[in-house]
Image (cartoon, rainbow, N blue to C red):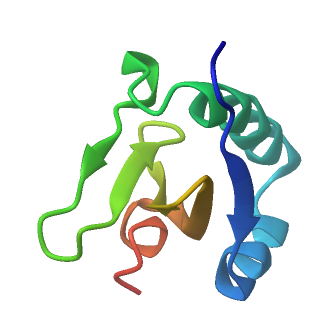
């Protein structure tokens, strides 16, 4: 049986998420389901960020989100256009 991770969201992530178009919010929710059951799913293009130890994943070609795996949860940190989604802005 696959153990599902629980999602958790920072306040920054919640604010950024609300600003996204509905189509990108839906796309994130679809990817969230996949990520919670399989963090290494190839379609997410997920990788560890060298400077922070956090992970980044692709929402679209131009949008990213970052997260951290903490025990049995995934803490989502940022989401948005490339640099903003990676927490650089």
- Position in image of residue 33 (x %, y %): 73, 30
Residue found at the very far front of the displayed protein: 1
Q: Is residue 71 above or below residue 89?
A: above
- Position in image of residue 73 (x %, y %): 63, 56
The residue sitting at 79% across, 47% down in the picture is: 25
- Position in image of residue 32 (x %, y %): 69, 38
The residue sitting at 41% across, 87% down in the picture is: 89
- Position in image of residue 61 (x %, y %): 42, 37
Left or right: 27 in relation to 49? right
The residue sitting at 82% across, 37% down in the picture is: 26
Residue found at the very far top of the displayed protein: 1
Camera-nearest residue between 63 and 7: 7
Q: Is residue 19 above or below residue 38?
A: below
Left or right: 32 in relation to 75? right
How many numbered discs sit on the rendered protein? 0
The residue sitting at 58% across, 34% down in the picture is: 35
Q: Is residue 72 above or below residue 27?
A: below
The quadrant of the rendering that contains the N terminus is top right
Q: Is residue 26 above or below residue 22?
A: above
Picture quadrant where residue 68 is located: bottom left
Picture quadrant where residue 9 is located: bottom right
């Amino acid at each position: 049986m696959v153990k599902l991770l629980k999602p958790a969201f920072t306040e920054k992530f919640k604010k950024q998420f609300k600003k996204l178009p509905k189509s990108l919010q839906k796309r994130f929710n679809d990817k969230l389901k996949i990520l919670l059951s399989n963090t290494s799913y190839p379609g997410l293009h997920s990788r560890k960020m060298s400077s922070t130890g956090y992970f980044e994943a692709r929402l679209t070609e131009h949008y990213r989100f970052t997260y951290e795996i903490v025990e049995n949860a995934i803490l989502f940190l940022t989401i948005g256009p490339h640099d903003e989604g990676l927490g650089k802005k």
